[in-house]
Every structure is written in structure tokens, then in C-alpha cells.
Image (cartoon, rainbow, N blue to C red):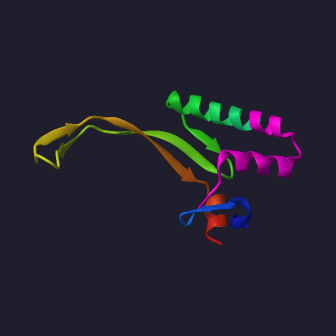
Amino acid sequence: MINEFFSSIQEGILYMNKTQLIDEIVSKTGLKKKDAEAAVAALIESVTETLAKGEKVQIAGLGSFEVKVKAERPGRNPKTQEAIIIPESKTLAFSASKALKDLINQ
């Protein structure tokens, strides 16, 4: 089932690119390719804008995307061994839904 969805293999890793996602949407919904492209673009834009505002995005059956803040912390320059302060930074986190985890672990 997963192999039907993720159709390409690169360096032993299954993946699906944007074009393949659009083609999959066209074949499953009967939408015109142009409409599917617009829908995917709108989804990406909406998710990106919401995350940029620091808000969480939850998609039922898929999971949730969230911006997390890594606090400022002490570190060490590996070249000079000098103590440094690593500044606060933001990172993107994805948590898979229970349904997706169950599907993957079949």
C-alpha cells in the first residue's frame, strides 16, 4: 500500500516529489492537472504562512507541524575548543498522526 503511494526510489529512500503528488491527486480525484497544481500550491502557501506566524498546523490523518524554539545554550567551538553561546533558534517539528503511524507500522 505504501509502495503505491511513494513511487520513486532514490538512494534506497522512498520519496514523492511535488509533481508526483499532483499526478496522484489528479488520478485519485479526476481534477484537471492545473486545478490540482493550484490546490497543492494553496496548501503549501497556507501551511507556510501559518507556521511563519508561529501557529500549529494539524491535518487529520496526516499529523501536525509546529515551530519549536530551541533555547540559547552553551556550546564549544570544535576547532578551537573555545566556549561559545549558541543563540536561540527555531526549528520545524512534525508529529505523525496515530492513523499514519498505524499505516506505516502494518
Quick check: is 98 in the magenta stretch? no
Please name whichever residue, 5 or 52, is drawn nearer the observer in this view of the structure: 5
Please name whichever residue, 89 or 5, is drawn nearer the observer in this view of the structure: 5
Residue 34 x, y percent position in the rendering: 81, 35
Q: Residue furthest bottom?
A: 106
Please name whichever residue, 63 or 92, is drawn nearer the observer in this view of the structure: 92
Residue 85 x, y percent position in the rendering: 19, 37
Q: Residue at 51% of width from left, 41% of height from top?
A: 66
Q: Which residues are magenta?
A: 14-38
Q: Quadrant of the N terminus?
A: bottom right
Count how many numbered circles sit on residues in the image: 0
- Relative placement, left or right, of 2 versus 23 is left
Please name whichever residue, 70 or 81, is drawn nearer the observer in this view of the structure: 81
Q: Residue at 27% of width from left, 35% of height from top?
A: 87
Q: Quadrant of the C terminus?
A: bottom right
Q: Is residue 84 above or below residue 103?
A: above
Q: Is residue 46 above or below residue 1?
A: above
Decide whether the magenta segment is chiefly helix, strand or loop.
Answer: helix
- Relative placement, left or right, of 83 versus 42 is left
Q: Residue at 10% of width from left, 43% of height from top?
A: 82
Q: Residue at 87% of width from left, 39% of height from top?
A: 32
Residue 33 x, y percent position in the rendering: 82, 40
Q: Residue furthest right?
A: 30
Residue 10 occupies which quadrant of the picture? bottom right
Quick check: is 28 in the magenta stretch? yes
- Relative placement, left or right, of 91 versus 4 is left
